[in-house]
Amino acid sequence: MIDGHTYRVGQVGSFVRIPLGYQDLFGVVAEVGAAVVSSGTPGPEQDTGRWMRVELAGEAIGEHFERGLSQHPNIGDTVHIVTERDLRRIYGGADDDQVVIGSLSSAENIAVRLALDALVTRHSAILGSTGSGKSTTVSSLLRSIVAPPGVEGAGGARILLLDVHGEYSAALSDVARTFSATPQPGERPLFVPYWALEAGELLEFVAGGLSDTHLVAFTDKIQQLKEARLEAGQLPGLDLQSLTVDSPVPFSLKQLWYDLLDFEITTFTGQQRDQPCLEAAGDAQTLTAPRYTPHALGSAGPFINQSAKGIRRQLNLIKSRLLDRRYDFILHPGPWEPDLAGNTPEDLDTLLEGWLGHDKPITILDLSGVPSSVLVRLIGSILRIVYEALYWSREKTEGGVLRPLLVVMEEAHRYVSPESGNIAADVVKRIAKEGRKYGVGAMLVSQRPSEVDETVLSQCGTLVALRLTNPTDRGRVKGALPDNLSGLMDLLPVLRTGEAIIAGEAARLPVRCRITLPPHDRRPKSCDPEVSAAWRTRRVAEGYDRVVASWRAQRTTAVVTEQTIARQPIPEEEA
């Protein structure tokens, strides 16, 4: 007992202090044990066999604490417990780049702060099993950055949150703008223009797997359509000499389909077999195919086009994709949808301004209504558009260097696994390796660390590890830790909900922390259903027609019968 506070000596995860002249070395107890004690009555000079292993992490001179060591202790130096006054020396500094995220588990009146600069630029990962409090931790952490209670937050922050399950819109609605593929009241529609994607990514989605010969046929036509668009009207920063098939230039996917199909089904007549037998021209806008006189056997004709590429099946798949309303957010992107000549009402600048340039610090991209077959490709496309834009504009005021961006990736194991090999994994790896230099930081959120690519996880300088029960997942976290704290990681299975072990560059010392909970009305929609209370309540049959209506509409708020309510203003004297 010291000054009315109880301290437990030698617990794994607790701190110790080693005085060395004017300096104090601080370390974390990583492991404790005891050797076999010889028989006999223990005396004051007899070795009790008890030991503990301490990982040194930092030093303090006066009230100033910093990570790293300028010297090491000697054999026989005394080891002291760390009191509340010492903890304030470590965690009490309220620098401009420090954000409060919670309190020490061992001393709840001591605030835990993270260095915002290191958290963003050196990347981070929030890992924990289902139900350990990941979503609440993410929500609390983001709110601590942009709007901490009673303190001026980072109002000019730029955070992009990829919300796979639609959990955060309500929790962060006061500090975020939400874009959704299935927008609810107060949300904006999410559009990702297909022509901003690389040609290979787009063709793999709309046409399936392509052989080299078939791929050339499509890319050549895309190049022609982009060249035609550029000749009709210049786009800033681009000319015909620098144009490539991957340049983000608008072109009509309908016109691509029509031109390639027309070439495939053309029949010819005449002595030179060069007179098209066209019966009806068709219409690219309505996806109506042209009609030609069917080819005939023998020498009379009509004759088929001998130069056809054999891509009828792929063209049928493109038409099917264009007609599938589930993919409207990418194939019919609202004001970014090109006409047949490739002209669009809006350009990419308004798209990026909507995502990154509005007056709120957080942007939520709600992907819960996106079909699973296209989710990973869509995430990769969004990340590529954002990263490429900030990479090439790094010397501009809205570039990543002068105004950094933090990208929060929920359910990262779904698209950054070692075997994925998809566009999303490639972009995330690029951000993890290069993003620091260009002002793009990554925050991975996952319940299966063992399924996250090891290269990406090793680039995360700060780890926030919540409760993890799977031994494979714990092993991956131990291997990724920047500090040798395997003993501390053995506490992961017994952490309480909302409690985390934080280690890495943003934390002054590896620490066991209770994350500050947001208010009840600002928590993500990820709470467990209250089974006992729900099953005790008498069932009220509201009709399964409403269930089927939501299923068919792919929208939780769908109704069977639309109700029209006539609203009339009430005069002030009656009110």
Image: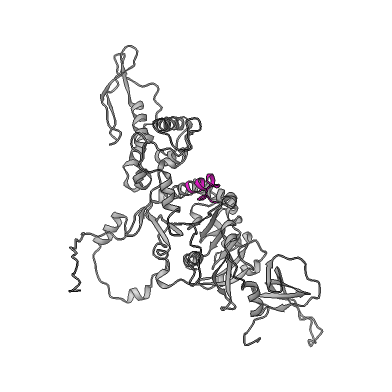
**Residue visible at 53% across and 58% down in the picture:** 443
Residue 373: say if magenta. no
Camera-side residue of 108 and 445: 108
The residue drawn where x is 38% and y is 70% is: 529
Residue 270, horizontal then vertical, whole percent: 30, 13
Q: Position of residue 77 (x, y in %)?
A: 79, 75
Q: Please identify the quadrant where the N terminus is shown.
A: bottom right
Q: Position of residue 570 (x, y in %)?
A: 19, 69
Classify residue 331 as left or right of residue 403: left
Residue 232 falls left or right of residue 108: left
Reply above or below: 158 against 144. Answer: above
Quadrant assignment, res 166: bottom left
Q: How is the image coloured?
A: one colour
Q: Which segment did they paint magenta?
A: 385-400
- Where residue 527 appears, as percent x and y from the top left, is 42, 69
Task: Left or right? Give the position of 115 relative to 382.
Answer: right
The picture quadrant where one finds residue 109 is bottom right
Q: Residue furthest front?
A: 573
Where residue 367 sits, quadrant-wise, is bottom left
Q: Is residue 233 above or below residue 529?
A: above
Q: How many marks?
A: 0
- Quarter occupied by the C terminus: bottom left
312 relative position to 356: left or right: left
